[in-house]
Amino acid sequence: MVSPTIDLVIEFALMLAIGAAMAILFLFISHLLAPKSKNPNKDQPYECGVVPESDARAPMNVHYYLVAVLFVLFDLEAVFIYPWAISLRELGTSALVEMFVFIVILLVGYFYAWKKGVFEWE
Amino acid sequence: MKASDIIAVLPELVLLVAALAILMVEPFLKPRLQKDEGGAVCGELAPDRTAILAIALTGFAASVAVALFVSGDTRTVFSGMLALDYWSVFFKVLFGITGFITMLISSNYLESHKRHMGEFYALVIFAVIGLDLMAGARDFILFYVAFELMSISSYLLAAYFRYRTKSNESSVKYFLTGSFASAIMLYGISLVYGETGVTNYHGVAVAIANRGGSAAVLFSVVLIGIGLAFKVSAAPFHMWTPDVYQGAPTPVTAFFSTGPKTGAFAVFIAAFVMAFPGAAHNWGIFFIVLSVVTMVVGNLFGLVQTNIKRMLAYSSIAHAGYLLAGLGAMGWTADTYPAGMGVLVYLTAYTFMNLGAFGVLAYLKAQSPDKFDFSLKHFAGLARRSPWAAILLSLFLLSLTGIPGTAGFIGKFYVFGGIVKADLIWLAVLGVVLSAVSAYYYLRVVIYMFFKEPEEELTFKAPISGGMAAALALTAAATVLIGIIPSQLWDAVVRAFGSLTQ
């Protein structure tokens, strides 16, 4: 039975307390130190973007979401491929095969979305 | 990675190929043409999806066959991340059967709700791949990834009837509580890693043994325990269960109440026995407390339910309580064998009887009008309307109660036997007393079906389909067979548990 001595418990409680204190402290310090400039432009959802002209909660075509999900999918694929390409020489043939298997699985998803008409705009 | 390591994941690869094949075949299915009396085409019907059902069933059958075929040698693969042993084979076979029966229940149900699509089958298969990897994982990272694969597929399955508000509500509730639980568990895993520097179950145990226990290890045991307790719907983390079970499509509920629960228990045992053997007494107490609360909450709230689907949700909470009592007994004594093997027997029995009970509900819903909402009064006089459904549902409910001669009795017998051997007689007595309480709400349904006159006559549609009949026959046969001759199952359990703890 693990029965931690009282100083181990105190040590752990200190860790939790210091962790929480650090998070709060940094937020507080940056709040104190950060330069602030009040400006109506600053309060816009997209600074330097197109001026918003209507409510943000407008109904959107669900196609946007599907395309966005597919974009995230291939974005992540690229994230995986970069480190893979750099260390391919050390990893050898098996890594090459694995990456192709990975891409084929992604392509099945892409193909499914395509045949289901995700890219057809009306 | 060695090429021979692939053998350990062959059952999952078979399932993956089946799921990908379904996604490739599905878009090419041609809609059936609807013809009027003269034979002229007057409209289109949804395509015939028998081919997809066939792929899914073949996938599950092949996965079970491959899992049995590669069993034999005990070793870890992928640098100690995954185990190839009887333990993982036992669970892979159980999950394969769970998936197989879920498919059989679903096809008829989805067809009658006009939502019969390939996605459903692919999602169930992905969830089962996650479950397989959870059972085989010997590393917290792999376990977590597998857990998420299973969870995310489950969230999608809960919302499968996306035009129904209840289905959406159930999915959102499941997703929010589930991701909350994942976050808590992940924090526990990160604390383990911070304390020991490894994520491998065995490595964690060695590191803790060398350095001695610490408060952080105990804290992480509790956090990981809470994360998994959400998935097995142990009280006080059970609030989502009745709503999700009621709102999700019935075949999906059948899957939820068996697959993910069994998977979470597999991890409970494997991770806690292998990674935290030094703290066994501590997590034993944690599980005992959890089990007492869960048994009481599940059974007492079950008493007042008038909706059978909700009643079965509370019943599944109560069953999680009995299983947790077994886990508590494992930790309480140094000898994990009796209670641990009891838990495995119980999980197998529970899988069959619960799939069967929800299967009958899915059958009734598939052939009934929309008015049928699983409330108790709609079950009145069922024995005359469809005697077979009434007899089978009675069998499964008796088994859930734990009547001798059924699988439920064998499961309870071994679990409570293990608890008594661990000198926790008060816990076993509490479990037996609460099982007696549960008889009230199980047998009430039987009385309604056989001895009550229906208040309103419900009209019924199509007769039972082949797949549904096969699923119900399979589960009923397993429930009775395990109840009468449990020796085969017992041998498999002894081998599975032996390969884990040696």
Image (cartoon, rainbow, N blue to C red):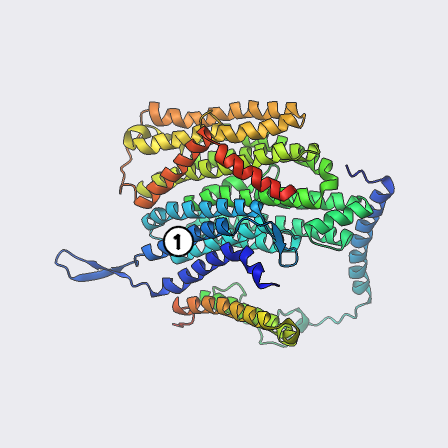
Looking at the image, residue A67 lies above or below residue B121 = below
Give the image location of residue B471, x and y in percent.
37, 42
Q: Secondary structure at mark 1?
A: helix
Q: Nearer the viewer, residue B205 or B382?
A: B205
Residue B281 found in image quarter? top right
Residue at the extreme right: A7
**Label 1, on which residue?**
B58
Image quadrant holding the C terminus of chain B, namely: top right
Looking at the image, residue B153 lies above or below residue B429 = below
Q: In this rendering, would B108 be left or right of A77? A: left
The residue under the point 54% across, 29% down is B412
- Give the chain letter at badge 1: B
Give the image location of residue B302, x and y in percent.
51, 30
The 10 Å Cα crowd at callout 1, few under 14, some 14 to 19, many 20 or more, is some
Give the image location of residue B257, x and y in percent.
50, 41
Residue B472 found in image quarter? top left
Q: Nearer the viewer, residue B21 or B246?
A: B21
Looking at the image, residue B337 lies above or below residue A103 = above
Image quadrant holding the N terminus of chain B, namely: bottom right
Q: In this rendering, would B158 be left or right of B207? A: left
Give the image location of residue B14, x and y in percent.
47, 57
Residue B150 visible in the displayed image? yes
Residue type at tag 1 = Thr
The residue under the point 29% across, 33% down is B386
The residue under the point 32% across, 63% down is B29
